[in-house]
Amino acid sequence: MKSAVALRSHACRLADRIATAAVLGLLALALLTVADVTGRYLFATPIRGFNDIVPLAGAVLLSACMPHVVARRANIAVELVGQRLGAAASRRLDGFGAVLCTAFFALMAWQYIRYAIELQQTGDVMPILRWPVWPWWSAVALFISIAAGVGLLTLGAGTPTEEAA
């Protein structure tokens, strides 16, 4: 039991670190967008290939935040039914929601892995830079897989507010 708690704690810390790096990456992407727009309109010199990178980098960075969302159970939950049925029913509903969330991320991971493999096999590349796109989608698949794994590790845990109490 103690090792399960330590494993959950480690998974949550890992998810937090990944999300912190991702948020910093999103901030950098926003600053680069300002630089691209400024260069485009003031000097008629946009950042070459930036339009190729933004959607893929955005997908990678946003998917990197998903393990944190799963670990902290920060997803949207409707608690009306649980409040009316009492604390025990509410905990069971939370557990059921956690199982569904984990299953959803596992299914998404499987599909992203299939998609990345397909992109590698077809040789899809970015229109301007001509870089392959499959590594970007492989990173998305990795982060979504981590989210599924974190969900699995935290299934028996309460919500973060319950654990702090």
Image: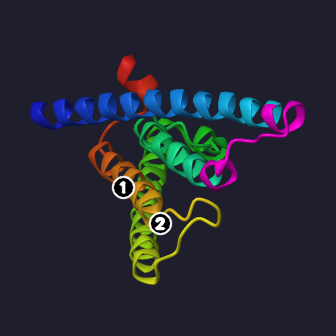
User: Residue 13 at what x, y percent from top left?
Assistant: 31, 28
Q: Position of residue 99 (x, y in %)?
A: 40, 56
Tell me the quadrant of the picture where the N terminus can be found.
top left
Secondary element at image label 1: helix
* Residue annotated with mark 1: 142
Residue 145 in the figure: left or right of residue 23: left
Q: How is the image coloured?
A: rainbow
What residue range appears in magenta?
Answer: 39-54
How many labels were placed on the picture?
Answer: 2
| Closer to viewer: mark 1 or mark 2 | 2
Q: Residue at x 57, y 44 (%)?
A: 85
Amino acid at dot 1:
Leu
Residue 70 picture quarter: top left
Task: Name the foreground residue: 73 vs 139.
Answer: 139
Mark 1 crowd level (few <14, some 14–19, many ≥20, 10 Å Cα) = some
* Residue 32 location (% of width, % of height): 66, 32
Image quadrant of residue 165? Answer: top left
Q: Label 2, secondary structure: give it.
A: loop
Q: Is residue 5 magenta?
A: no
Q: Which residue is mark 2?
A: 132
The residue at 64%/67% (across/down) is 127
